[in-house]
Amino acid sequence: MSTIHQNRLANRRDFLGKLAGTAALIGISNLPLAAAPGVLNENDSPGMGLSDPDEWFKNNIKGKHRIVFDATEPKEMLTFAWPKVYLLTNKGTGTDEKDCSVVVVLRHDTVPYALGDSLWSKYKLGEMFKINDPRTSAPATRNPFWETKPDDFKVPGLGAVQIGIRDLQASGVLFCVCDVALTVYSAVAGTKFNQDGAAVKSEWVAGILPSIQPMPSGVWAVGRAQEHGCTYCFAG
């Protein structure tokens, strides 16, 4: 066995070990990583096959005022209200939204917000991630922040606010999603629904909402955003 091949195998074992440890920390210790070699083969690493994420930052982060919202846990409407508040208060103090660069990194338990309605319904993502539909107060079977209605979200003192993903994208807000979290949770969903984890991962990637950029990892994206001048804001 060549030294290069040995190193690849060692790197893969190290990565899978770390991923399994992460899974245990977030309460999914039954993740079948060792039994599911199709999820990552010996030549893979997180983010391989993605369009150039560095170029995404270079091409899009241009505003005078720059911020990255690090979204790790679903916080109902707050995950999406904070970017809106940032834009509104900048406008109120003299900076139009076109002169702001706002990045929302969907990682850890917020990754389903990057996925379309059909995946929410098929894989019961509302139950899996404990996200309720604001219209029904039951576990969501759709992405509650995608096909929104004008009065879906109301804030005391402000009234109805337009904080759906489409609305925010129209205001220039950039969304990206963690590929590692997609890998982990699609494997979990594959086990739950007795499907191949790699096939579920491919389905989830194909179902990412328009203009949401996959990133090698969420923490990678948070770091790159800051390298491009974005102030960090923890958003759950």
Image (cartoon, helix red, strand yellow):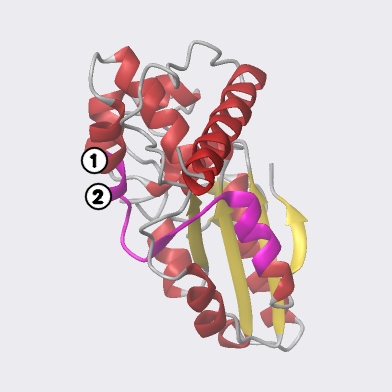
211 shown above or below 99: above
Q: Which residue is mark 1?
A: 203
| Whether residue 136 can be seen here | no
Q: Residue at x 31, y 27 (%)?
A: 197
Question: Residue at left 50%, top 84%?
Answer: 59
Residue identified by numbered label 2: 206
Relative vertical location of residue 36 with respect to residue 95 in this rendering, above or below: above
Q: Is residue 141 above or below residue 216?
A: above
Residue 66 falls in image quadrant = bottom right
Most foreground residue, 94 or 213: 213
Q: Amino acid at mark 2?
A: Ala
- x and y, in percent, of residue 7 in the image: 56, 42
Q: Which residues are magenta?
A: 203-224
Query: Is 12 positioned to the left or the right of 156 in the image?
Result: left
- x and y, in percent, of residue 225 in the image: 66, 68
Residue depicted at 62% across the width and 17% down the height? 24
Please say if the residues under marks 1 and 2 sit with CB atoms less than 8 Å apart: yes
**Quarter the N terminus occupies:** top left
Give the percent coordinates (x, y) of residue 65.
72, 81
Mark 1–mark 2 Cα distance, whole angstroms, equals: 5 Å
Label 1: how many Cα within 10 Å (few below 14, some 14–19, many 20+): few
Res 86 seen here? yes
Label 2 environment density (alpha carbons within 10 Å; few <14, some 14–19, many ≥20): few
- As shown in the figure, which amino acid type bears the numbered disc 1? Glu
Please tell me whether residue 91 belongs to the stretch shown in magenta: no
Q: Is residue 207 magenta?
A: yes
Coordinates of residue 74 in the picture (x, y in percent)? 57, 36
Left or right of residue 195, residue 175 in this image: right
Q: Residue furthest top?
A: 30
